[in-house]
Amino acid sequence: MKFLKALLAVFTFLAVALTGALLLVQDKNSPRYIQIYEGEQ
């Protein structure tokens, strides 16, 4: 039972780390702002 709990903890940590890394990479590659109205003013 301890082994299963440890495995679950490891997989949970990996999932959180991968999600954070993906969000960070997407944030670095995304433009700072999106122009919705072009030439409005």
Image: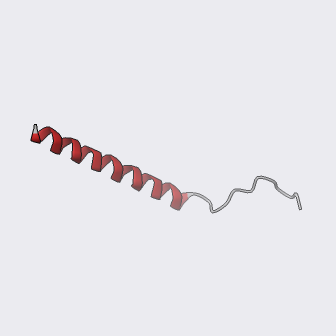
Q: Is residue 39 above or below residue 9?
A: below
Picture residue at 62% right of the left edge, 60% below the top = 31
Q: Position of residue 2 (x, y in %)?
A: 10, 41
Q: Is residue 32 left or right of residue 19?
A: right
Which quarter of the image is occupied by the N terminus?
top left
Frontmost residue, 12 versus 1: 1
Which quarter of the image is occupied by the C terminus?
bottom right
Query: Residue 8 appears in which quarter of the rendering?
Result: top left
Q: Is residue 7 above or below residue 25?
A: above
Q: Is residue 24 left or right of residue 17?
A: right
What is the tally of numbered marks visible in this picture? 0
Q: Position of residue 13 (x, y in %)?
A: 28, 50
Query: Residue 39 appears in which quarter of the rendering?
Result: bottom right
Q: Is residue 35 left or right of residue 29?
A: right
Picture residue at 25% right of the left edge, 44% below the top = 11
Frontmost residue, 22 versus 4: 4
Q: Position of residue 17 (x, y in %)?
A: 34, 53
Frontmost residue, 7 versus 33: 7
In the picture as drawn, the residue positioned furthest to the right comes out as 41
Q: Position of residue 18 (x, y in %)?
A: 36, 50
Frontmost residue, 39 versus 5: 5
Q: What colour scheme has been applied to the protein in the rendered image? A: secondary structure
Picture residue at 81% right of the left edge, 54% below the top = 37
